[in-house]
Image (tube, coloured by chain):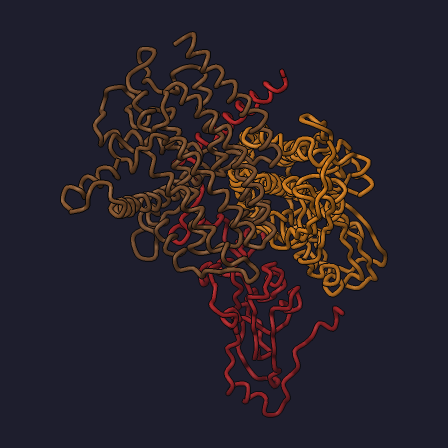
Chain colours: A red, B brown, C orange
Amino acid sequence: MGEYLQNIWASISSSLVGMSITLKHLLLIRKGNVTLQYPEEKWPRPERNIGFDHKDYNVIRSKLHVDMDDCIGCYKCARACPVDCIKIETIKVPKGTDIGTTSNDTKKRLLVTRFDIDMTECMYCNLCVYPCPEECIFMTGGPNSSKHPIDYEFSEYNREGLMYPFATVTQEEIDRYTDSETPEKPAEKEETA
Amino acid sequence: MVVDNLMQWFESWTLWEAGSPLLFLIVVVIAGVPIFLLMAVNALVAVYAELKISAFMQDRVGPMGQGPGLHAGKWGLLQTVADALKLLLKEDIIPTLADRKLFIIAPFIIFVTPFIALAALPFNQNLLIADLNIGVFYILAVGSISVIGIIMAGWSSNNKWSLYGAMRSAAQIVSYEIPVALSIVSVIMLTGTLSMQGIISYQDGTTLGILPNWILFNNPFSFIAFFIFFISGVAEVNRTPFDIPEAESELVAGFHTEYSGMRWAFFFLSEYANMLIISGVAAVAFLGGWHSPIPGFLESPGWSLFWFISKVGMLIFIMMWFRWTFPRLRVDQLMNICWKVLLPLALLNIFGVGLWGLFVA
Amino acid sequence: MGIVHGDEMVLNIGPQHPSTHGVLRLKVHTDGEIVSKITPYIGYLHRCFEKHCENLTYEQVIPFTDRCDYISSMNNNFGYVVTVEELMDIHVSEKVEHIRVIMAELNRIASHLLALGTFGMDVGAFTPFLYMFRDRENILDLFEMTCGARLLYNYMWIGGLSHDLPVGFVEKTYEFLDYFEPKIKENDDLLMYNKIFIERTADVGVLPPEVAISYGVTGPNLRGSGVQWDLRKDEQYSIYDRFDFEIPVGTGQMGTVGDCWDRYWVRTQEMKESIGIVRQALKQLPTEGDVQELVPKKIRPPKGSIYKRTESPRGDLGFYIISDGKPTPVRVKLRSPAFTALSALSAIAEGWMISDVIAILGSLDIVLGEIDR
């Protein structure tokens, strides 16, 4: 009988404790509210110094972007990608032809005819960003964020919308350099196999 | 006593003679319209309140649409209207292997139960569809019809989860009718009437000097009876912590797993209407009905309506408060509480009220 | 009075069900509400993790380990990275070790919060679930600040870390810990000490220590059964020997040792211990040093194999790696603690009711991403 009454008392008292907690939250909602009205308000991005030095790298996992002006077609990002979502095709240009230099003053030697990133496959691991010698592939809002504001809301209505072709080379340019030579096959990951 | 007044009014200018069955039918249909509206409005308001209360308790703000158009109004006020429209437009799916006839009838039976029960609930001195001389008994009796609807829904869906929900629900509602009825019995012993208005008029005046003469404060036994009634009432309308028939983490959605669109909305409407009825009966039987909490203060019909609605609203709020605080009981624990705690207490209460009436009052 | 047995009904809980914590299918034989036989069917979330690893370089495996136990990615990173480092005989710097411990313990708190919240939801309490998610968000903010990702971090690298701690991280972490400590008590009052919750969990799904050991159950589930087994102390790795912390074990406060309530209680106590570890690590944290100085340019571990296990929030997380000296591993095997916990389900949940099976499943805290891999 004593245990029976004790149980009833424990039920009542613990229920009242629980109810007082929820009531407190109900009454203090103005102070306690933690949600945002999403499309109007957005969660602030964590602040971090912006720069390209590793120490104050502004980390972000958003949309991948490539500055094609700086790309030398070295395949390093494609090789680093664990899910192979970066597809690159290049053609060699004849020796002595000037196809521009990057902002790091590296002479381009390969014409990048295809640089597709399939963001549906991307797993946002950031691994492609580190090996790039020209620092031209990055998540938007990260380094070079003055040029590319953060963009993590890039939903599309169909799959094709998430395939980003970055290559800027025109067909004429390709034709100009492929008259004499056959286009080179994209380098596979032979050395890793 | 809307029905009586309407009858008299019709008789005063039409050629029908008094007590004509046809006239009675017309009057009943007319009187049914406000009940239907009441149920719809109740669901709209209560669902909105539930969204907001649950949100505030969980450090959220709930629906917060800005302005008209696609958004749901200021502070999300139009959220439930939008939900209702969505439910109206949704596809009505009937499973291929379901028992079609029962599947279609079940929501209506469940819907009809609170509908007819509301006819005996007095909102103020005059606003009452019919003042039955067995009002409380009628409401409790009618309330158990919904079990049939729930079993029909669960069985006809041809879904194991639905069947479990239905079986649990049937056991639960049948069990909890008993403490509900027994705690009402102690009220009836005091008032000596089954009529809702009779019970309310018994609670006029003051007790212990300042307190209103509500049955809640009448004697210690009726005080406990209120809690027995309210807890059993929560169980009867299948709300947390007694929501095992539709326990979403166990039975997906219980007896209405297979329902969608408007048919599902009927379950929803009746759930909230049932809350209204249980709270209404609790308010009438224990909290003085439409009487003002300060005896003799603001007792005009308009204010009476206000007092009644605020009492009912308070009780509905407490039900929602329960829901967003407690975990759910297991089916056997639910039965234990009913048969081993609430029922003995209710019986003791009847005994106590009897002794009180004999020796103290 | 004998028990009346009716016909048995076969019930499929899942793969789509609100409380299977992923895509698990339980084939349950029921006699009324009583469950007589449970057969878990797994594989709905199988993503060929181990086969994938054979075609990836060692550093490319790390983002895949994130996705095994997606609730505690940092701990998975940690386990894998520690294993490869031991194979390659790399000894990372003090600073890296400290940051790793901080991240792992923060992630343990986040993981336990999710486990407790979903357990609460399984027994019908919705509000504690959202309170715990609210607090978990703060930890995820800290992670986002550090490595840009909120769930799948790819933060720990072989020989280092992907990023140094950002400016202001230490202050923010202290701020969070100060905020969080009182919240544990509030959540406990709201859910753990609620009588209904005690009724639902105490004496339910008792996992006796010998059964737990014979099934290979580890982590909080084993400790809930009263066995003091924590790899952070018993098979010391990283720098856990420098921190002062207790290993809470279930004592059967509300019922029997090893019931669902004990498993819940052990997790709440572990969160408190993790807070202590984070505080100590933050205090000792060296400020100088490059977190990537030891990251090898080419990761080619020597020929050989290694098995190493670490304490993830769910238990012993073991990695078995065979290397043939090439940049890709020959074989990577993951020993999943959630898998063993699930295998014990039928042993402890048979004979209980459907509602209890759901509660026991919630108390075991399984993550299907790790079970199916």
Q: Nearer the viewer, residue B269 or B354?
A: B354
Residue B316 in picture, x, y percent from top left? 40, 34
Do we see residue C119 in this rendering?
Answer: yes
Residue A4 in picture, x, y percent from top left? 61, 20
With respect to residue B92, does B220 lie above or below?
above
Residue C120 found in image quarter: top right
Q: Nearer the viewer, residue B154 or C282?
A: B154
Q: Nearer the viewer, residue C62 or B106?
A: B106
Q: Is residue C253 left or right of residue B260?
A: right
Q: Quadrant of the C terminus of chain A?
A: bottom right
With respect to residue A72, does B281 lie above or below?
above
Q: How many marks?
A: 0
Q: Is residue C237 left or right of residue A24?
A: right
Residue A66 in picture, x, y percent from top left? 53, 68
Residue that appears at 69% across and 34% down = C204
Residue that appears at 82% across and 59% down = C323
From this viewpoint, which residue is outermost toward the top? B359
Residue C251 found in image quarter: top right
Residue C89 in picture, x, y percent from top left? 80, 50
Q: Nearer the viewer, residue B326 or C281?
A: B326
Do we see residue A28 in this rendering?
Answer: no
With respect to residue A25, does A57 lie above or below?
below
From this viewpoint, which residue is outermost toward the left? B13
Q: Quadrant of the N terminus of chain A?
A: top right
From this viewpoint, which residue is outermost toward the bottom? A180
